[in-house]
Image (tube, helix red, strand yellow):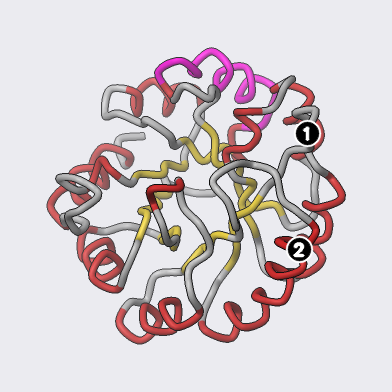
Amino acid sequence: MTGSLLEVIALDVRDAVAAEEGGADRLEVVSDIGSDGLTPSAELVAAISKECGLPQMVMLRRNAGFTVTPEELDRLRKEVKELSEAGAAGFVFGFLSADGSVDRDATDALIHAVSPLPWTFHRAVDHAADVQAGWRAVRLLPNLATVLTAGSAEGVGSGLAVLRARAEAGDAPLVLAGGGLKREHVPVLLDYGVRAFHVGSAVRESWSDPVDPARVREWRRLVDLA
């Protein structure tokens, strides 16, 4: 990656257009932010495609946790084709087993379903029983573009040491820093070599309000200070 990447969460077309106006590089498109982001409809993805030129990384997730049932997984696999045809440029997913380890079977099934499109491993890695083992299980998976991570289930402020360790292990190009990301974290992460940033609530007044292009521009300037 050259330069820095800024990804903005979009809940609707208005968010997507505002993110593009503010200078974002790509979108994470989700529904039901109250559940931390679930799979949006193909209709929403298509509507965004008509009004916004940014790549859409589309969430594949059916419940508020990080586990997936066989029935949910089957549904997600079927939805991939429809979402791809609607305009998805890639996908966001990642699951844990009941013991807190990365659920490779479920993750591999969706990697196969979305291929050859790129994908982001979701923040499940921050909630793994053994975070370092989780990273070892994920980092070399096929077509992996980024790992959305705060370094900690509690957010970036608590996860900086883990993010630094991942960067020192050579994983900085994979890190998409997000989850309680604040402005003061960015210079520290840039110093670690992290160049991809993910924001949601930081670019709007509240989740009930749309993305604010002016706030996106502020983040654009901030992440471009490398």
Q: Relative to 182, say whether 175 is above or below.
A: below
Write down the residue under mark 1.
98
Q: Quadrant of residue 32?
A: bottom left
Write down the residue under mark 2.
71
Q: Relative to 137, say whether 107 is above or below.
A: below
Residue 211 disc label: none
Q: Residue furthest right?
A: 105
Decide which of 73, 161 is in the foreground and name it: 73
In the image, residue 166 lies in the stretch drawn in magenta? yes
**First in residue order: circle 2 vs circle 1:** 2
In the image, residue 131 lies in the stretch drawn in magenta? no
Q: Amino acid at mark 2?
A: Glu
Query: Badge 1: how crowded within 10 Å, few (<14), some, or many (20+)?
Result: few
Query: Badge 2: how crowded within 10 Å, few (<14), some, or many (20+)?
Result: few
Q: Secondary structure at mark 2?
A: helix
Q: Which residues fall within the magenta stretch?
A: 157-171
Decide which of 155, 37 is in the foreground and name it: 37
Q: Amino acid at mark 1?
A: Ala
Q: How many marks?
A: 2
Which residue is at a point 39% across and 51% down the rendered structure image?
33
Which residue is at a point 44% across and 83% down the rendered structure image?
43
Q: Indicate the position of residue 52 as horizontal and vertical percent values.
A: 33, 77
Q: Indicate the position of residue 171 as horizontal and vertical percent values.
A: 66, 32
Task: State how far apart marks 2 and 1 are (Cα).
Answer: 16 Å
Which residue is at a point 59% across and 86% down the rendered structure image?
85
Instruction: Work out which quarter of the rendered image holds the C terminus and state it.
Output: top left
Disc 2 + disc 1, Cβ < 8 Å = no
